[in-house]
Image (tube, rainbow, N blue to C red):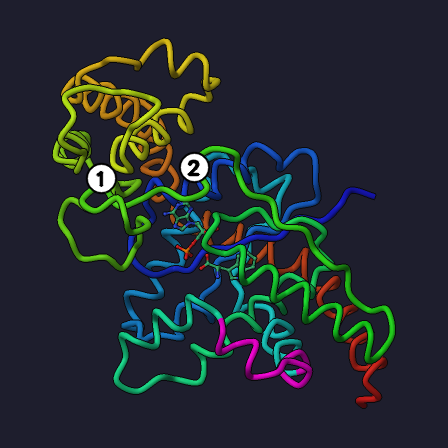
Amino acid sequence: MKTRVFSGMQPSGNLHIGNYLGALKNWVRIQHDYDCIFCIVDLHAVTVYQEPRELRAKIREIAALYLAAGIDPKVSAIMVQSSVAAHAELAWMLTCVTPVGWLERMTQYKAKAAKQESVGDGLLQYPVLMAADILLYQAGIVPVGEDQAQHLELTRDIAQRFNTLYGETFVVPETSLPTVGARIMGLDDPMQKMSKSASGAHHAVALLDPPDRIRKTIMRATTDSQPSVDMDSAGPGVLNLLAIYQAFCGWSDEQMRSHFQGMRYGDLKKQVAEMVVSQLEPFQQRYGQIVSEPGYLDAILRDGAARVAPVAEETVRLTKERMGLF
Ligand code: AMP
Ligand code: TRP
């Protein structure tokens, strides 16, 4: 039997090249080697307020982006988290074995909580729900970007704690990070990770941005006071542009060095911009085709949920049995 892979993205904000290079691109690459489930985690999105109509549209947009990136729905299951009730059910059972202190230590929680006047309980529970997503399907591998590594460590801790208390129940999953592109930084500020919720007009390249906008954003990217690329002393802005290029084209470090060493920043930016535009163009064309077929997405999401539900139900049954629940 193939090892199961589970990963997901929140249907909030606009997916950007960080999401693609950190996660989605790898999902496409590994989908034939594993038994994959790719989820649209709407219950995670509502840990901060989402306008209901926009959320409903966003869920389908993310599904279409998965497909446009090359996830094959005949091979992988694409599903919406809230369509399988077992995610929330298992989350409660895991909550009961999770110390609050573990959750309060999460850096993403601390960052998000600092921005809110009143912190919803969902924000604290967020990583427990994420653990439930993964453990529900007994996933062995979880391909994500680096910002999720701490949540994955917590998932492992929760699984181990449950297994110790109640007996072997859950597979303890491994984190899979890409070698290049695990943490793409903001183009306007290379000290901050590229984020869907950042407000700067030139912060991110969204996957559906038109070519002119992509070029403008990259040409305005923050670099440093040097005139040209020095691979040995490049600052974070230049390293970020190089990482974007390398993650898109898959070149080795040697190829990158021989091509870019000594190149003026203006030319570097032009080359990065053309690389991103040329990679996103076919992607955007496929997206356009997918959303023009009414009913197609909903059928895929229904099929995905139907395929994964028996696995989820079996894990809930086993967990209840272990805990002595009815
Ligand atoms: P999210 O946008 O939080 O739903 O994240 C979806 C996936 O994209 C997760 O696997 C993240 O780790 C990944 N991701 C988000 N931002 C970045 C980034 N700036 N660089 C690399 N990966 C990222
Ligand atoms: N928290 C993840 C993020 O924001 C999304 C997510 C939810 C996820 N459940 C998951 C990722 C399970 C991997 C596995 O990126």
Say if mark 1 contacts mark 2, CB within 8 Å.
no
Q: Does label 2 point to a residue whose CB lies under 8 Å from ligand 1? A: yes
For image coordinates 74% across by 74% down, the residue present is 161
- x and y, in percent, of residue 13 in the image: 29, 58
Indicate the quadrant where residue 101 lies.
Answer: bottom right
The residue lying toward the viewer, choosing from 291 and 234, is 234
Q: Residue furthest top?
A: 258
The residue lying toward the viewer, choosing from 112 and 23, is 112
* The disc label shown at residue 155, or none: none
- x and y, in percent, of residue 261 in the image: 30, 14
Dot 2: what SS? loop
The image quadrant where one finds the C terminus is bottom right
The residue lying toward the viewer, choosing from 314 and 109, is 109
Circle 1: residue type:
Asp
In the rendered view, tell whether residue 198 sits above or below residue 267.
Answer: below
Q: Is residue 180 magenta?
A: no
The image quadrant where one finds the N terminus is top right
The residue lying toward the viewer, choosing from 220 and 273, is 220
In the rendered view, tell whether residue 55 sits above or below residue 14.
Answer: below
For image coordinates 63% across by 69% down, the residue present is 132
* The disc label shown at residue 209, or none: 1
Q: Earlier in the sequence, mark 1 or mark 2?
A: 2
Q: Which residues are magenta?
A: 93-105
Tell me if mark 1 has few (under 14), some (14-19) or many (20+) residues whose alpha carbon lies within 10 angstroms of its own.
some
Circle 2: residue type:
Gly
- Residue to which mark 2 is pinned: 181
For image coordinates 18% across by 57% down, the residue present is 199
Dot 1: what SS? loop
Marks 1 and 2, how far apart at CA: 19 Å
